[in-house]
Image: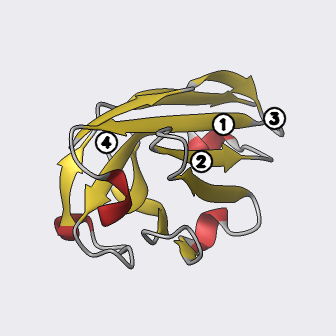
Amino acid sequence: VQLQASGGGLVQAGGSLRLSCTASGRTFRNYGMGWFRQAPGKEGEFVAGIDWTGSSTNYADFVKGRFTISRDNANAKNTVYLQMNDLKPEDTAVYCCAATAYIGGSSRLDRYYYWGQGTQVTVSS
């Protein structure tokens, strides 16, 4: 499956952004989806995941209550979203979407087989 992420940008602290990741090539609904991020000089980390139906989600502790992951399997949109509210300077990173054959989703980076290119999110203080 091919993944294309978009929606990053520069925002002030406290602001919001919505990232989108559109999938093509294979049946989107067969995959759990996740968002990961990597800040300069740091390892990649899990941000949020969602199961194949969109009914089950999980989040890293540092984004709970601020970020929301969702997906649209219908109407051939094949898109997963990450709504990011109350952004903080420490959220600055390259954000990547990924697909996993674990249809329930996973927080483990090594379970994700397909990766999109990253989109830069920069939060100014």
**Which of the two residues, 7 or 21, is positioned nearer the viewer here?**
21
Q: Does dot 1 land on a helix, a strand or a loop?
A: strand
Label annotation for residue 41: 4
Q: Distance between the residues labelled 1 and 2?
A: 6 Å
Of badges 3 and 2, nearer the viewer stands 2
Residue 55, x across and y down, in percent: 59, 75
Q: Quadrant of residue 122?
A: top right
Residue receiving disc 2: 82
Of badges 2 and 4, nearer the viewer stands 2
Q: Earlier in the sequence, mark 1 or mark 4?
A: 1
Tag 1 and tag 4, C-beta contact below 8 Å: no
Quarter of the rendering occupied by the C terminus = top right
Residues packed near mark 2 inside 10 Å, few (<14), some (14 to 19) or many (20 plus): many
Query: In the image, is residue 32 above or below residue 15?
Result: below
Residue drawn at the location 49% of the way across and 67% of the way down: 50
Label annotation for residue 115: none
The type of residue carrying mark 4 is Gly
Q: Does dot 3 land on a helix, a strand or a loop?
A: loop
Q: Does dot 2 land on a helix, a strand or a loop?
A: strand
Residue receiving disc 1: 18
The type of residue carrying mark 3 is Gly
Residue drawn at the location 54% of the way across and 41% of the way down: 75
Q: Distance between the residues labelled 2 and 4?
A: 23 Å
Residue 67, x across and y down, in percent: 68, 56
The type of residue carrying mark 1 is Arg
Q: Which of marks 3 and 4 is nearer the N terminus?
A: 3
Residue receiving disc 3: 15
Tag 1 and tag 2, C-beta contact below 8 Å: yes
Query: In the image, is residue 49 above or below residue 89?
Result: below
Tag 1 and tag 3, C-beta contact below 8 Å: no
Q: Distance between the residues labelled 3 and 2?
A: 14 Å
Residue 76, x across and y down, in percent: 46, 39
